[in-house]
Amino acid sequence: MALERGALWPALAAVDLDRSAEEVETAVADLSALHLLRPRGVNPAPGPVPASDCYVPSNPEVAVTHLVGPIEADIRRLRRRADILSAQVMTMKTVFDEAWENHRTKALIEYLTSLDGIRSALERVSASARVEVLTAHPEVPPAETLEDGQPRTAETVGRGVLCRTLYPHAVLTHGYMRQHMSRMAELGVEYRTVSHIPDRLVLIDAGVAVIADPEQPAGQGALLVRDPSLVRHLYRSWEGVWNSARPFADRGTSAPRAHAKEELRRSILRLLDAGMKDEVAARRLSMSTTSYRRHVTDLLTELGAQNRFQAGSYARRAGWLDE
C-alpha cells in the first residue's frame, strides 16, 4: 500500500485492509525497524490524521546501508583491533619458540659432550636413586674405570638401592673382571651376562636413563633422558635382556671361567654360522680382532672343519648352538 500510494497512514490502512489498529502498528514498527518505512514530516492527507502518522517507503539499498552499515563498521573496527593485538602478541613467538625448545630439550634430553660431563651426570643421577639402578655395558671396561666407579656403586648399594648389571660373556674371561664382580656381588650387586650388548646404558628408578651416544666415540658423548615414554621403553628392553641372561656366581672355583669359555665359544660359532665379518664379530664380543681370529682357529681345529662356514654347519648339527 505504501509503495502503491507513495505513503502510508496506519489509521487509514487499518480501515482499507480491514485489520485492527494493533496489527497495522506492529507491521509498521517492524518495517520501520528494518528502515523500509520512515516517518514523513508533512501530512498531505485531508482530515485530522497527524503528520507523524504518515510513513513513506525507503529504497532497500538505502535501508541496508542504514541497517547493516553500523554493524559492518563495528566489524571493521574489531578486525583492525584484532590485527593490532595479533601483531603485538606474535612479536613474542620467536622468543617463545626458542625458550620452549630449550626447556623441552633440557627437560627431556640433555646432551653430554665430555667425559667430565658424563661422570658428573652419572654421579648426580646415582645420588638420586631410591629404588634401583640398572646398567648394561657392551665392552670389557678397563680396571681403572672399575676402580673409579666402585665407591659410587658401594654408596648406592649401602642406601638400600638394588643394583643390577649386564655384561657380555667375554668379561668372564678376564681375571680382574671376575675379581671385581665377586667383590661387588658380596656387597649386593647382581650380575648377569649375555652374548651381546649393543649400547652402554644406565637406568635410574625407571625414570631417568643415561645412554652412550652412538654418534660419538666411546666415552665422549652421552644422552641424559627423562622422557617417560622413551625411558619406559628402555626399561622394558633391559628387563627382557636380563630375564634371558645367565647369572654370575663366582664361588672361588673355575666354574665361572669355564662357563664363560663355553658361552664365548657358542657366541663365536653363532657368528660364524651367520657369516659375520671378523671385525664386526670382534666388536660384538668385546675383544680384539686378533683374539677373535685366534678363537676361530681353535674352533676350526676342534671341529675338524676346513673353513668357517663348515665350522658353523658342524656346530649346528652337533647341537652346540642350541640353548
Image (cartoon, helix red, strand yellow):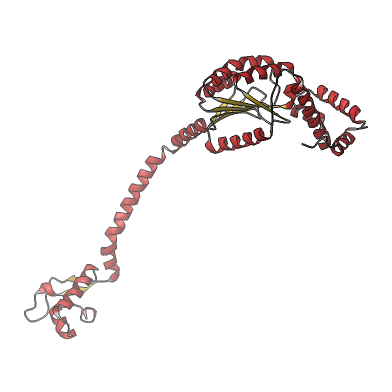
Q: Which of 237 and 56 is in front in this view?
A: 237
Q: In this view, does 189 lie to the left or right of 72?
A: right
State whether residue 225 appears in this view.
no
State whether residue 156 appears in this view.
yes
Looking at the picture, how far across and down is residue 268, in whole percent?
81, 30
Find residue 233 and report its image quarter. Answer: top right
Image quarter of the C terminus: top right
Find residue 234 and report its image quarter. Answer: top right
Residue at 65%, 35% (x, y): give it.
Answer: 243
- Vertical comparison of 236 with 10: above or below: above
Residue at 68%, 15% (x, y): give it.
Answer: 143
Image quarter of the N terminus: bottom left
- Vertical comparison of 75 with 198: above or below: below
Looking at the picture, how far across and down is residue 88, in whole percent?
37, 40
Q: Is residue 88 left or right of residue 116?
A: left
Residue at 86%, 37% (x, y): give it.
Answer: 318
Q: Which residue occupies the extreme left position in the image? A: 48
Looking at the picture, how far across and down is residue 68, in whole percent?
29, 62
Residue at 28%, 60% (x, y): give it.
Answer: 69
Q: Nearer the viewer, residue 44 or 289?
A: 289
Looking at the picture, how far across and down is residue 209, in whole percent?
57, 30
